[in-house]
Amino acid sequence: MTISVDELATKAMSLSGEARALLAEKLVESLDQESVRGIWLTEAKRRRDEVRNGQVKPILVLTLWKVSASCLMTNDIFIPPRGTC
């Protein structure tokens, strides 16, 4: 009996949070390091290309830290100030 990824995901989502976390941990551990490296390299290139073609505008990490800290201290939802993104 074979089960599709979508069916498996649906069943997994019905597990408790603790069981889903354990399952996620086991799945991540099952990946070989070369696969993980390739996945992250692909993602890094995609993000680089988004910046280069103007789809996204990078912000300074210091700006991110300041805005995040401010929002955390006031318990607000993180919404970057206009002009930072």
Image: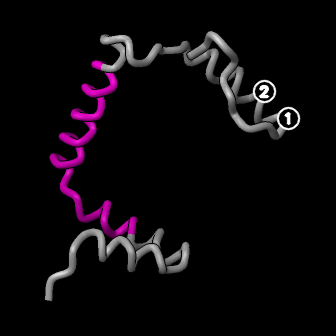
On screen, residue 48 above or below 20: above
Query: Residue 18 at what x, y percent from top left?
Result: 54, 75
The residue range painted magenta reads 24-49
Query: Residue 73 at what x, y percent from top left?
Result: 83, 34
* Mark 1 element type: helix
Question: Label 1 crowding class (10 Å Cα cut-off): few <14, some 14-19, many 20+?
Answer: few
Task: Please give the name of the residue rendered at 67% of the width and 14% of the height, measured from the top-left corner.
Answer: 82
On screen, residue 65 above or below 3: above
**Farthest-out residue, bottom:** 1
Q: Is residue 70 left or right of residue 2?
A: right
Residue at label 1? 74
On screen, residue 47 above or below 9: above
Q: Are marks 2 and 1 in contact (CB under 8 Å)?
A: yes
Q: Quadrant of residue 83?
A: top right
Q: Main secondary structure of the magenta part?
A: helix
Q: How many marks?
A: 2
State the CA–CA distance, disc 2 to disc 1.
6 Å
* Mark 2 element type: helix
Q: Quadrant of residue 53?
A: top left
Quarter of the image for the C terminus: give it. Answer: top right
Task: Please give the name of the residue rendered at 39% of the width and 66% of the height, measured from the top-left corner.
Answer: 24
Q: Is residue 63 left or right of residue 59?
A: right
Q: Quadrant of residue 47?
A: top left
Task: Please give the name of the residue rendered at 21% of the width and 80% of the height, measured from the top-left corner.
Answer: 3
Residue at label 2? 70
Q: Is residue 81 left or right of residue 55?
A: right
Task: Please give the name of the residue rendered at 34% of the width and 69% of the height, measured from the top-left corner.
Answer: 26
Magenta region includes residue 16: no
